[in-house]
Image (cartoon, rainbow, N blue to C red):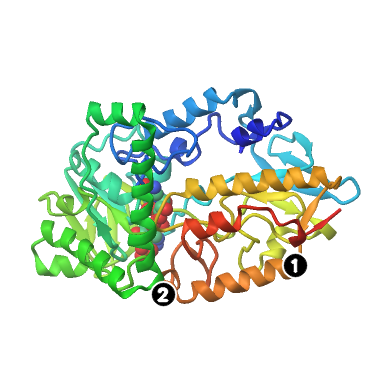
Amino acid sequence: MGIKLKQAGDDDFIILEKADDLGGTWRENTYPGAECDVPSALYSYSFEHNSEWQFKWSGQQQILKYQHDTAAKYGLGEHLKYQHEVNNLVFDETEQRWTVGTVGGEQFTAQHVVCAVGQLHKLATPVFANADQFNGRLFHSGKWDHSVDLKGKNVVVIGNAASAVQFIPEIAKDAKHLTVFQRSPNWILAKVDRPYTKWEQRLSLKVPFVATLYRRSIWALGEYGVLPAIKGNRVSKWLVKKACLANLNKHISDPEMRAKLTPDYPVGAKRVLFSDHYFPTLARDNVSLNTEGVVSFTATGVVDNSGNETEADVIIYGTGFQTNPFLADIDVIGLGQRTIREAWNDGAQAYLGVSTHGFPNLHLLYGPNTNLGHTSIIIMLEAQTDYVIQAMRDLDRLAKQSCEVKAEVEQAYNQELQARLSTMAFSKIENSWYKDGDKVTNNWVGGTREYVKRLKKADMAAYTLR
Ligand code: NAP
């Protein structure tokens, strides 16, 4: 957003960041093996190619470096204000301005607020009975405690999804014994990763056409290979499932273990994972899979539903994030003193994922129904930033101060989305972080091609202008 604003000739903005560095998820998640499960050639800005990626799927540190390098190259330093955690946003109807308040008590006034707080940053830490009695070390993967040495320790991991399948293979190398508590299995595809060769890196630097073709080929695989499976296409579902089962069967020979690791829900209902190392790790002698479910903690471990205790020196939560309600930590007060919590009482929604009725000039990036299960979120974010800048420009052109999406426009849009989502894999599961109750609040309904097309031009007729 900052880069696009500067490119549009607008330097009059600040970026408020709660931490003391940029990077979001790539700053916060430092667990061993942390990497992006979308290939970097696509999980990067379309306008900022990087020929130095070392692997097809990059590690956390390399992505964070890319973010730092990009921010520096485009001169964002002067706009960034660290240790400014926003906790309230209040719209002044008379002035048509937002007041932005921080935890530290500072206030800023702005015509536009762009909210880019992400969906996955509030840790979900289930509370088990007697959790306070545990005498060992305990932490969440999203706040990895690097002071804990896992060498020779008995380690319990609770959770086995996107984060866990990345760190479990790493920590199993050190642990004396590692027990993975799995509540439900995941569909997992093989990555077949390898380092890029020097000549491949040079080729992508010297021949932009090749880099573009490569980016598009990765995009096409997600859009035309994985997305149809999520939408329910029988052939795609069969193909993705078959590839996942081949990955499982290659590494796990025990039929009982295979059964435990085979999901009973449709491909794509939860995030399809990528790993070359997770299943081989489960087959190690020092690793066990427990599917009984955690009931309580003791001073020295974890008790499961069968009454068995698993000893633990360290317990690691790989239990993900609280994604709902959206904007949980910010009091947003819009027109008529209505809070966004009240407006989103039945689950978050927003027109195109960007604008919501009652909150003029509040522009959401990675807002409701914009998450993806098949490709790079950067594509969505770039479409959103371009859209928001267009809307700002149009307001100036029309000599207006604010735009508020019309209730009926947002309602019709949301109805269309929910009708389409109800037939997709995301809806075919009781619980997931994609949902708030029965409503799929987090995910987009289709491909990025459709989304980008719908955001191509800001339709100001959808808004009340003041
Ligand atoms: P997650 O996908 O929400 O997974 C949480 C895991 O904890 C699941 O296995 C879940 O089991 C389990 N769990 C939750 N509560 C539990 C409880 N009370 N008892 C037992 N198990 C429990 O979280 P995540 O793995 O941190 O990933 C979150 C999202 O972050 C991903 O979907 C992905 O979008 C993103 N992510 C991306 C990357 C990347 O490479 N781009 C890497 C990591 C994460 P159930 O399945 O039964 O609910």
Q: Amino acid at mark 1?
A: Ala
Q: Quadrant of ligand 1?
A: bottom left
The residue that appears at 46% across and 60% down in the rendered structure is 447
Horizontal relation, residue 1 to residue 300: left or right? right
Picture layout, residue 144 above or below residue 379: above
Reading the image, the residue beneath label 2 is 428
Q: Is residue 24 left or right of residue 220?
A: right
* Residue closest to the eye, 262 or 79: 79
- Asked whether residue 330 is in view, the answer is no
**Residue 302, horizontal then vertical, whole percent:** 29, 57
Instruction: Tell me: is circle 1 under 8 Å from ligand 1.
Output: no
Of the two numbered discs 2 and 1 in the rendering, the one whose residue sits closer to the viewer = 1
Please give the name of the residue rendered at 9% of the width and 65% of the height, measured from the top-left corner.
254
Taking 152 as reference, is 46 left or right? right
Measure the C-alpha gap from mark 2 to mark 1. 29 Å
Specify the farthest residue to the right: 94
Callout 2 crowding tier (Cα within 10 Å): few <14, some 14–19, many ≥20: some
Q: Nearer the viewer, residue 108 or 376?
A: 376
45 to 248, vertically: above or below: above
Please state, as top left, top right, bottom left or bottom right, where the N terminus lies in the image.
Answer: top right
Compared with 342, 201 (above or below) is above
Q: Name the residue carrying label 1.
A: 407
